[in-house]
Image (cartoon, rainbow, N blue to C red):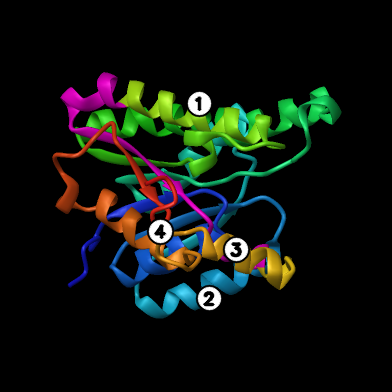
């Protein structure tokens, strides 16, 4: 059963990792996918090619979600190309980890700009379209770090906690127009980035998780399918921890 048949989704930061996993599962479920990337042109082209096999419309756009103007122009282009926007997934994000005493102002500002301001930029850019349609699902990618904090990640934790507050407020503002706003807070997800870590570190993390494994991009993507589809039509303003029980 294709749960997203005929729906159009924007997914930011989708050329690799979790974003790529979401784009892939969405195409499998019949969604038309407009995805963004910042610099990975070759990876974006390869993803476009792979996803076309599912018979839906797929297009990658090079764009900087941290820029308000870029986000406005991007959504205009997507509307011209796809005609509608039913789902927005704000997934673009970066880390610049350091202890607070060593963290520079630029490292704090950049993470807030890319991780949090991008959510404002993109939500603002799609709002008018969703209001006209009187429907829409916005899914914002936070993190367990945004829920519980983490030493060495004050900037990242602040950005991800901010996403939760922003999303709850959007849910309250737009609920009367049938526009839903929810958050997914991933735990330890194994991607290309974590594959570079030493095996002992990864093994230690896995052992501290009740399900005794790291998550996969597919685990996050499946949660996104649920929140994007009509299966969750009475769910808004919620944060879903997809973390194998880490926060239990």
The CA span between labels 1 and 4 is: 23 Å
Q: Secondary structure at mark 4?
A: loop
Q: Position of residue 57 (x, y in %)?
A: 39, 65
Within 10 Å of disc 3 (Cα), the crowding (few <14, some 14-19, many 20+) is some
Dot 3 corresponds to which residue? 16
Residue 15 appears in the picture as rendered: no
Instruction: Say which quarter of the image contains residue 26.
Output: bottom left
Query: Pointers 1 and 3 in contact (CB under 8 A)?
Result: no
Residue 179 screen position, x and y as percent: 24, 33
For the residues labelled 4 and 3, the Cα–Cα distance comes to 22 Å
Residue for badge 4: 244
| Mark nearer the viewer, 2 or 4 | 4
Residue under pointer 2:
49
- Label 2 or label 1, whichever lies nearer to me, is 1
| Position in image of residue 70 (x %, y %) | 61, 35
The answer to whether 245 appears left or right of 116 in the picture is: left
> Over which residues does the magenta segment extend?
171-194
Density class for disc 2 (Cα within 10 Å; few <14, some 14-19, many ≥20) is few
């Amino acid at each position: 059963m294709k749960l997203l048949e005929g729906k159009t989704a924007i997914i930011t930061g989708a050329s690799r990792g979790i974003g790529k996993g979401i784009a892939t599962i969405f195409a499998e479920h019949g969604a038309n996918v407009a995805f963004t990337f910042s610099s990975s042109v070759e990876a974006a082209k390869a993803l476009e090619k792979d996803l076309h096999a599912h018979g839906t419309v797929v297009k990658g756009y090079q764009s900087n979600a941290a820029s308000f103007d870029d986000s406005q122009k991007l959504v205009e282009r997507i509307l011209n190309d796809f005609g509608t926007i039913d789902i927005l997934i704000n997934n673009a994000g970066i880390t610049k980890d350091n202890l607070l005493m060593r963290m520079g102002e630029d490292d704090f500002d950049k993470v807030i700009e890319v991780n949090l301001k991008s959510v404002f930029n993109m939500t603002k850019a799609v709002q008018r379209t969703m209001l006209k349609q009187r429907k829409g699902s916005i899914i914002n990618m936070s993190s367990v770090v945004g829920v519980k904090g983490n030493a060495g990640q004050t900037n990242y934790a602040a950005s991800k906690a901010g996403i939760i507050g922003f999303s709850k407020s959007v849910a309250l503002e737009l609920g009367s127009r049938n526009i839903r706003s929810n958050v997914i807070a991933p735990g330890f997800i194994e991607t290309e980035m974590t594959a570079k870590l030493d095996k002992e570190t990864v093994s230690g993390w896995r052992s501290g998780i009740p399900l005794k494994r790291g998550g996969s991009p597919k685990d996050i993507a499946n949660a996104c399918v649920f929140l994007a589809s009509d299966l969750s039509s009475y769910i808004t303003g919620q944060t879903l921890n997809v973390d194998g029980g880490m926060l239990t």
